[in-house]
Amino acid sequence: MTFHRFAQGDYEVLLLQAQPPLTTRTADLFPDVDAGELAEAVRIAPESFVNGGEEIFFGQTIALVRGHGKTILFDTGVPVDHERATLLKSLADAGLTAGDIDLVFLTHRDLDHVGGNLTEGRPTFPNARYAMARTEYESYKVDPVRNHFPTYVGPLEELGVFDVFEDDAEIAPGVRLVLTPGHRPGAASVLVEDSLLLAADTWHCPAQVTFPNWTIKFDSDPELAVATRRSVIEQAATEGWQVAVPHTFRLGLGRVVDEDGRMRWVSSL
């Protein structure tokens, strides 16, 4: 399955496979995980793991929202010539082309989220404006580690097709940015119709819903990432939101349920 389509209020939402799942060593992603917690995670979310938890599935899904005369893509995936890049194929499988996109909103700076911005120096999505939330934009420009702003955003600015949104902007009717910092300083999630959260990289596997203290080794600020994750998980459970996250199995759509004070991820697919 390369895409999933569903309705959310006035919008049509597509979840598009951007990278097929592969397995990687769990300890390579989550080096500080307690062995007892890992065993429990395998029990409650067995689809996420293989080899008794030694390895974990890790792919990528990108969301697209259509409605009110706009088609918005959230992130562009790895570079289009990457051997694992499948976003454009998934888009085609869903009956759309790159030219159908009106707005590309970049949730954060990571290469697997901005790498597909350009194809041979031109916008991959030729009719779209691109945008990023202000805090992430300002931080990305001066990031000494992920220092590829000049490669993936600079050309868009030079072409005059890049915008900076305020961190809490409503980017379309009923589509609002929500700052979720920690994984990256200005990472932005997106709330659609007050009922669907596109949670960016707030967590990377279902086990983190039960164990929000798990931090992936890539987090810029692990303590802040944990605090943000706890807050989002609690609010998602309280509000009954559907949640879409990029790096979990089954295209990453599910809900957070509170089972006597213990949170758990339940896949919707």
Image (tube, rainbow, N blue to C red):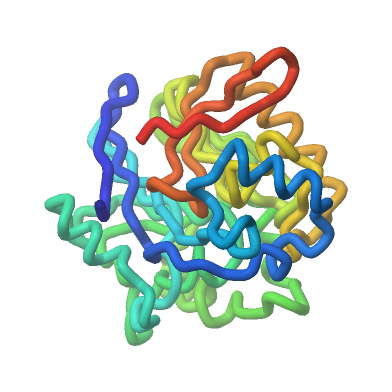
Who is closer to the viewer here, 133 or 193?
193
Who is closer to the viewer here, 30 or 238?
30
Q: Residue furthest left?
A: 95
Q: Position of residue 109 (x, y in %)?
A: 60, 64
Q: Position of residue 55 (x, y in %)?
A: 59, 64
| Residue 67, quarter of the rendered image | top left
Q: Position of residue 4 (x, y in %)?
A: 27, 42
Who is closer to the viewer here, 69 or 39?
39
Q: Residue at x 58, y 15 (%)?
A: 239
Q: Residue at x 24, y 59 (%)?
A: 90
In the rendered image of this protein, does residue 159 appear above or below residue 254?
A: below
Could you tell whether 74 is left or right of 232 in the image?
left
Could you tell whether 177 is left or right of 18 in the image?
right
Q: Position of residue 158 (x, y in %)?
A: 47, 75
Q: Residue at x 26, y 55 (%)?
A: 2
**Is residue 225 visible in this depiction of the protein?**
no
